[in-house]
Image (cartoon, rainbow, N blue to C red):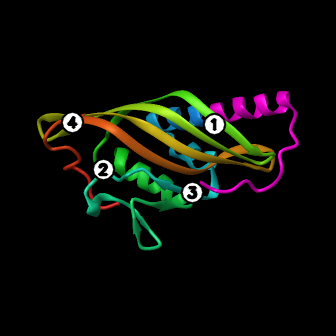
Amino acid sequence: MAAPTGELTMTAAEQLLAIEEIKKVFATRLRVMDTKQWDLYGPLHTEDVVTETWAGLPGDKQPKANGQSNRASGREHLTNSIRGMLGSSTHVTTAHHGHQPEITITSDTTATGIWAMEDELWWTNGDVEEHLHGYGHYHEEYRKVEGKWLISYRKLTRLRETHTPDFFEYMGAL
């Protein structure tokens, strides 16, 4: 995770308000992703966002940034990668939940967070309904840009997955 970009001068009340704003941007991201509102997805992230959330997929199905697999870099690349995974050629119904946030304000403009997560995905592969149910954690960083808290980094770590045998067969390369 990134080092703080400045000192922490916020009052306790200002820190609590910042934490609530971060919770809101996190919750909005999950809702917008599940409802496939891709025009709203990118603006919840910084322009230089880096995301590492595809480690469980075969290498040819992971996005790449700067030669690294399991990585999307920048708002547009991230949005296109998520859209490609969740509904470009095959519509994937999703339900993402984030719980028990551990948010730390590290400076007046930076913060880190860890969220317990659970996700479920369903899609049709020919005549068969495929399914994934996962559990794990989002490890995130946030940055305040022009008065708004945005997501600047995300890594998904999974503790457990249960899924049907043809898990993500439908996907092309991201």
Q: Which residue is mark 3?
A: 75
**Residue 18 at x, y percent in the picture:** 75, 35
Contact check, label 1 and label 4, Cβ < 8 Å: no
Q: Which residue is mark 2?
A: 56
Please name which of the two marks, 3 or 2, marks the residue nearer to the observer: 2
Q: Which residue is mark 4?
A: 163
Where, quadrant-wise, is the N terminus in this rendering? bottom right
Q: Earlier in the sequence, mark 2 or mark 1?
A: 1
Q: Going by the picture, which residue comes out furthest to the bottom?
A: 67
Could you tell me which residue is drawn at 83 percent across and 45 percent down? Answer: 8
Could you tell me which residue is drawn at 57 percent across and 45 percent down? Answer: 140
From this viewpoint, is residue 36 visible?
no
Q: Is residue 68 left or right of residue 23?
A: left
Residue nearest the viewer, comparing 168 with 4: 4
Task: Check disc 4 and give the amino acid type.
Answer: His
Q: Residues within 10 Å of mark 1 (few under 14, many from 20)?
A: some
Residue nearest the viewer, comparing 7 with 85: 7
Q: Is residue 152 left or right of residue 56?
A: right
User: Where does the magenta region start and end?
Assistant: 1-24
Real-space Cα separation, disc 1 to disc 4, in angstroms: 29 Å
Task: Check disc 3 and give the amino acid type.
Answer: Arg
Tag of residue 25: 1
In the displayed structure, 32 sits above or below 89; it is above
Q: Earlier in the sequence, mark 3 or mark 2?
A: 2
